[in-house]
Image (cartoon, grey):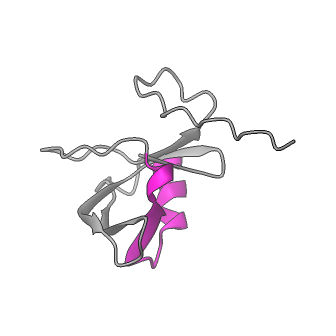
Amino acid sequence: MFIHQDKLYEVYCRSMAQGDLYGFLEIEEFIFGERSNLVVDPGEEKLKNEFAGVRRSYIPLHHIVRIDEVEQEGTGKIRDHKNPGGGSVTPFPQGARPVKD
């Protein structure tokens, strides 16, 4: 799970590692649900379209909310960051910047 432009992204991938770019997490081989053509999840479809053609993505470490290793993948989602819909994960608080006199 990571935050991008005030949206909370939940993605599933086969591989992730500390990237060659300092301060970035490298994720690759995205997994999208194998649904039938008759049932379309608009949230997952939006995520799938956004990452279409992407082999590898670099996420800034300070945007990462949570990393889980799961036995079975779920459905990727994009949610509003300010009101994630009752999720149990609270982002790490960002400290206020000191005021210069």
- Residue 34 in percent (x, y) is at 28, 56
- Residue 46 in percent (x, y) is at 55, 56
Q: Which residues are magenta?
A: 40-64
Work out whether residue 13 or residue 26 is closer to the camera in this orientation and state it.
Answer: 26
Residue furthest to the left in view is 71
What residue is rendered at 23% in x and 47% in y? 73
* Residue 69 at least partly seen: yes
- Residue 37 in percent (x, y) is at 38, 57
Against 53, residue 57 (above or below) is above
Work out whether residue 84 or residue 95 is closer to the camera in this orientation and state it.
Answer: 95
Left or right of 65 on screen, residue 46: right
- Residue 97 in percent (x, y) is at 70, 41
Against 12, residue 72 (above or below) is above
Give the quarter of the image for residue 89: top left
Left or right of 47 on screen, residue 28: left
Against 33, residue 57 (above or below) is below
What residue is rendered at 47% in x and 73% in y? 52
Work out whether residue 76 or residue 18 is closer to the camera in this orientation and state it.
Answer: 18
